Image (spheres, rainbow, N blue to C red):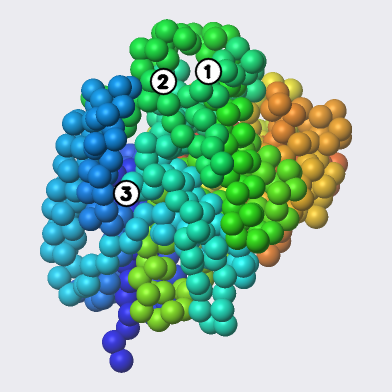
Amino acid sequence: MTASVVLGLCAYTHDSAAALLVDGHLVGFVEEERLDGIKHSKAYPAHAVTWLLEEAGLSPQDVTTVAYNFDGRRYLSALGQFPAHLRQPASRTRAFARARSFTTVHRRNQARMRELSQRFPCARLQLVQHHRAHALYAFLASGVDDAAVMIVDSLGELQTTTTWRAHRDGPRVILDLRHAINDPASLGYAYGAVTEHLGWRRGDEEGTVMALAALGDPARFRGLMSRAIRLTADGFTIDPALLALRVLSSRYGRVTPTFVAATCPPRQPTAPVEPVHADLAAALQERTEQVMLHLATRARHLTGSGVLCLGGGVAMNCVAAGLIAQAGIVDEVHVPPAPGDSGTAIGAAAAAWLDVTGRPPVGIAQRCYFGPAYPGLTLPAAPRPGLHAAGLAEPAHHLARRLAGGEIVGLFTRELEAGPRALGHRSILASPLNAGVVERLNATVKFREPFRPFAPVVLADKAADYVRLRHPSPFMSLAAPVTDLTRDQLPAIVHINGTARVQTVTREQHPFLADVLSTFGEITGHPVLINTSLNIKGKPICGTPDMALDCLVESGLDALLIEDWWVTK
């Protein structure tokens, strides 16, 4: 019997990725940037596809379905908005450009689908609505049987915010759309617009603005942001007089002269960060939190479910997600490890399998380690000029002792994790007890802004001593208030707003990291470490041994544990 081989793709836009299902089992998933070294790579994910097919022992001719994470035919629905935009004074000057841009994207999408058909000549091509791919992945990753699913991003084809009811009916999964908000009402667009105005890269550095927000006073621009993003009974709208109507072209800015006049001139990326920038970031973040809480309340009302799954780029706003979790709107909040567009490669593949069989694929729930691994890796004594490698008999204990001694160490082990957070397989670890560790990490290891906080990883059964979580946070998705113990003894992991974006670890999830935390706890009294991604600013998380060795050479890391090899300078 011929196997069903479904290749899910996110490609040609940003965060390219691929996922492979064989007879409904997830073989693997990997983001292209982790293999080609280009952060937020928008290329066809050639490296990812090659690895997946080799892992499964297959060729491109064996692929029976290619599931793409956008349905390009839906871009043309934006043309129906043209008359309304033309009538409105604030959007009139962009109405024609917007209509042309959506037509252009539709045409480009058709060409890209022809390219995919040529790459996989024996496969059926299935176009999956973008928010459906997000929603399926968010629900399946949670492992629950019934949930409200809320997707909030910048733009699908035309949707920006959707609410779904998802539930299991025997072996089947039912996904029912309950409400949709279309562009130009887009929370992701608004956040990206202000991120860019503040001098950081939209689609990449929104997290920097979220961190900066804790240093500012939202009152200064609270009224402005309330006008820019207006709450409505069933969601929100965007004021085009402040945040310009979207045109799918980088030549068109996102904030209007009125917005600039009411806030500050655009900040250049190398310019100093001033109080006005922190205040604008604070107002943006506060409004984002208000909108997300409003949407979560609506999702509970529309579905009746006490479980909420979040997806889309805005779901990476861990402060907003954490507030929803703390607010008591629902009993549980789940965010998948890859809530952004890369994760829709899994969602698209899942949709294609579900549509044919009625059943969900397996191997997705509560998992994040899907990518390449390098078991049996052998290093020479000098893997790079100036580096020395030595094998270890007890790597976990050795690493814990070095961390307790104050060293900052990169960790590269087992399968590559999915998503934007390092979850203990491609991490930089450090002791939160060391004075000046945050300053050293930002200045000499990560080369990033001094106000950026660092997240803790803690043994799940000890988490209540350090953070106030209502349920586990295995994918470092939620910012939670810290306890007095943490504030007093581990200030390095506490952001100025009194929270920490925590990862909770069980021995079943990650036995090696659990051993490291246990040993570190025996030495120091606290089974808690700083955990940040194995990369430097502007580069992706290291997906290959060569990338990890380069990171050691180019940064202020003291050492790198790569599988069972201890590498030092």
Q: Find residue 96 and name its label.
A: none
Measure the C-alpha gap from mark 3 to mark 2.
Answer: 23 Å
Residue picked out by circle 3: 157
Q: Is residue 231 above or below residue 378?
A: above
Task: Say if mark 2 contacts mark 1, CB within 8 Å.
Answer: yes
Say whether disc 3 or disc 2 marks the residue closer to the N-terminus.
3
Residue picked out by circle 1: 224
Question: Can residue 329 be seen here?
Answer: yes
Residue picked out by circle 2: 242
Q: Quadrant of residue 539?
A: top left
Q: Quadrant of residue 366?
A: bottom right
Residue shown at 51%/74% (left/top)? Answer: 173
Residue shown at 44%/46% (left/top)? Answer: 181
State which quarter of the image contains the N terminus.
bottom left
In the foreground, 254 or 514: 254
Q: Is residue 201 above or below residue 21?
A: above
Residue type for callout 3: Glu
